[in-house]
Every structure is written in C-alpha cells, then in structure tokens.
Image (cartoon, helix red, strand yellow):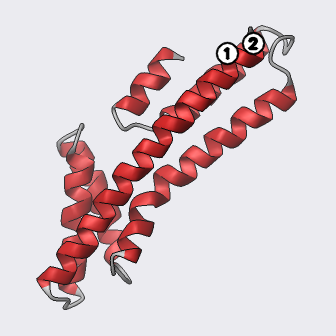
C-alpha cells in the first residue's frame, strides 16, 4: 500500500493501484479478512478517484470559459508535459494546451489565461481530492483487514 500512497503524492493514479493491491491481498487471504462487500466499497473509492483524476482539470477549465477542442489541447498538453517534465509537467502542459486552444478559438489572451488557470486549479483540486481518497482507502483497508 505504501507505493500507492507515494504514487498519489507524486500526482500519479495511486488509488487504482491501491485497489489492485487490496484485490491481490483478498485472493491471497481467500477473502477471509477482506470480504467482497468491503472490496466493493474500496472499488467504488478507486473508481471515484479515476473519475476525479480524469475530469477535475477539464471541468474547471470549462467553468473558466474553455470550450470546444480546447479540452483536447489541454489533454495533449498534459500528456506531453508529463512526459517531458514528469513531476510538474502535466500542470504546465495543461496550462499551455488550454491557452493555445483558446487562442486558436480566437479568444483574447486574457480569456485564454483565465481558462488555462482554471484548468490548473482544477487539476490541483483533483489531486487534493485524490490524496484524501487515498487516505480514506488506506484507512478503510486497515479497518477491514485488522
């Protein structure tokens, strides 16, 4: 479970990893300490984490005024940024992608900056929520198995 928490801290999708570890634990333990109902609860938390991870930045960018293909630019920028600068590149790439998308949409640069900033704030919020979900997941896993 510790690598999963570390993954979350480095802004990676750690809660699904935690779920896989819990599932493996269940199989090894023949589901004596971790029953299927508890595993389903942990699975719901992992699913919620994936949804938050994939949508937080884009939803915030939408509320910041981004529209249309701008979201694709944001996703592409986040992926490229993560590859180029693994720790914070996703944020930088998301910002640049949304900014470029809005400029291409012929929006004023102030509007583009607002939408891009909202996207980054949404991503940071999503990571914060995922950290909380990771702590909840780990706590419940310990409660279920001890």
Q: Position of residue 129 (x, y in %)?
A: 48, 45
In three-dimensional space, the C-alpha distance between marks 2 and 1, rounded to whole angstroms, equals 5 Å
Q: Position of residue 131 (x, y in %)?
A: 46, 36
**Does residue 39 sit above or below 55 in this rendering?**
above
Q: Secondary structure at mark 1?
A: helix
Q: Position of residue 7 (x, y in %)?
A: 41, 28
**Does residue 21 sit above or below 71 in this rendering?**
above
Q: Quadrant of the N terminus?
A: top right
Mark number, residue 13? none
Does the rendering let one see residue 132? yes
Q: Residue furthest left?
A: 109
Q: Residue furthest bottom?
A: 106
**Does residue 32 sit above or below 44 in this rendering?**
above
**Residue that carries the numbered disc 2 in the rendered image:** 145
Q: Quadrant of the C terminus?
A: top right
Mark number, residue 142? 1
The answer to whether marks 2 and 1 mark residues whose Cβ atoms lie closer than 8 Å is yes
* Most foreground residue, 7 or 118: 118
Q: Is residue 31 left or right of residue 145?
A: right
């Amino acid at each position: 479970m510790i690598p999963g928490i570390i993954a979350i801290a480095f802004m990676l999708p750690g809660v699904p990893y935690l779920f896989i570890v819990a599932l493996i634990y269940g199989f090894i333990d023949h589901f004596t300490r971790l029953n299927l109902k508890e595993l389903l609860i942990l699975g719901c938390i992992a699913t919620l984490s994936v949804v938050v991870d994939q949508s937080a930045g884009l939803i915030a960018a939408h509320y910041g005024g981004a529209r249309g293909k701008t979201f694709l630019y944001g996703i592409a920028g986040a992926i490229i940024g993560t590859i180029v600068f693994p720790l914070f590149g996703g944020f930088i790439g998301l910002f640049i992608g949304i900014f470029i998308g809005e400029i291409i949409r012929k929006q004023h640069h102030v509007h583009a900056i607002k939408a891009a900033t909202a996207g980054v704030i949404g991503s940071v919020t999503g990571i914060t929520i995922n950290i909380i979900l990771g702590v909840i997941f780990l706590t419940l896993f310990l409660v279920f198995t001890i």
